[in-house]
Amino acid sequence: MNYLRPPLKLRKKGPHKRIKKIWSNEMFHKKIKKKIAVKPNLIPILDAVFIFIFFLLMSAQFIKIYEIGSDAPAVSLVDTKKNDKNPLNLILQIKEEEIVITSGLENNVVTQVKKIDGKYDLETLREHLVKIKQNHIDEESIILRPVSSVGYKELVLIMDAVRKLENDSIMVEGKSASGEVVKTTKLFEQIIFETMI
Amino acid sequence: MRSKTFGKVRKKVGVLDLDITSLLDILVILLVFLLQSFNSSDLDVNFVEDLILPNSNSKDYGHHSVIVQVNKDKRIWVDNQEIGKIQNLEMEIPELLGALKAKKGESDAKLSPEDAQKASNHKINVLIDESLKYENVRQIMHTAAMAGFPAFKFIVKSNDE
């Protein structure tokens, strides 16, 4: 601590008063450090976000569309391997008032699913198809034979019902031709419309 | 010697500091929204007028190929070009048959002879209005099969919307 003379301006005039003020070196050489907030550089992030947005805008689809596949019978993917067992030959005859499920080469009627309140009973249809699938777990194809007056909207709902189970957590279990136990949520995904060609 | 700048007050030009936090906020929200509607399939459809697709639970993504659209007035478009209308209940639609044969010729020219033989390379995306009957659907499918497109992909709308 040094006793130094205060600056000229601070010296009081008039009756002499000894200013006893301790001036220290630190007061003259003190640097007040201001804390400057460090701002992160957002420009690279902004650049990346802009590029992402352009890319996603080009590929955005605001109406979600999917596909349901089908084949003409002339080039169907039905398994044509020679088998001792009779082929399943599962056919869905979609009539105006009901759906008739037939199978086998002689088109034996398995069951008939009537309409309820003017709509096809898809739940009952699915239950019957699940039972058939359990006994023929390897079979993937189904033939649809709708009448001309069936609406396309209803036809799509029926195609949904025959392709897959509604709830993915429930599985169909059955024994394959090789003896393995197979679990699947798929029913009959290969849809073939009869009499195309 | 006196300094030339003695007495002059120099103003320091400060850098204009833009606050882009709010802009970045908006862009991130836009990014999240667009991520949600991101489509990983290569199928790009320009819907024609008066065409409402049926709803479906299907989750299979479509793929790029020839697109046939039929609206509620039975007007037909092939790859966004209107080619005619379903006039009657004849199994073959002549205008559609001609247009699809031309498309098949164009696509086969790009494929090798072996690939051109494969049916899997001759797919057709079919967008049909939900109000039409099966008889019209059958006409479209029959004509497409005669033109050399035996694999049909019915394009449907998701039930999730």
Image (tube, rainbow, N blue to C red):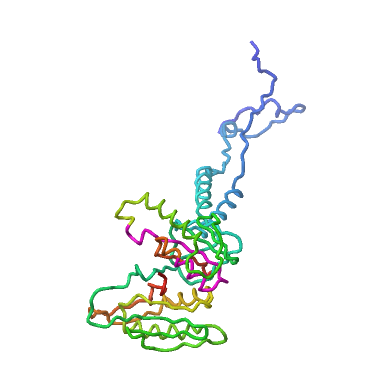
Q: In the image, residue B107 lies at what x, y percent? A: 40, 52
The picture quadrant where one finds residue A127 is: bottom left
Asked if A47 appears above or below B86 in the picture, the reply is above
Q: Quadrant of residue A79?
A: bottom left
Residue beneath the point at 27% across and 73% down:
A80
Q: Position of residue B114 (x, y in %)?
A: 29, 55
Q: How many marks?
A: 0
Q: Which residues are magenta?
A: B117-142
Name the outermost residue toward the right.
A14
Towards the viewer: A57 or B73: B73
Residue in the image at 53% along x and 58% along y: B77
Taking depth in this image into account, of A8 and B142 the one nearest to the observer is B142
Answer left or right for B54 relative to A187: right
Taking the magenta stretch, the answer to whether it contains residue A129 is: no
Q: Quadrant of the C terminus of chain B?
A: bottom right
Using the image, determine if residue B33 lies above or below residue A103: above
- Most extreme residue toward the top is B1
Q: Is residue B49 left or right of residue A111?
A: right
Quarter of the figure that contains the N terminus of chain B: top right
Of B48 and B76, nearer the camera is: B76
Q: Is residue B99 above or below residue A187?
A: above
Could you say which is closer to the camera, residue A181 or residue A161? A161
Does B28 sit above or below residue A154? above
Residue A35, how many percent across, how many down?
Answer: 57, 42
Residue, x 50% and y 64% (percent of image)? Answer: B93
A72 to the left or right of A138: right
Residue in the picture at 58% in, 33% down: A24
Q: Quadrant of residue A193?
A: bottom left
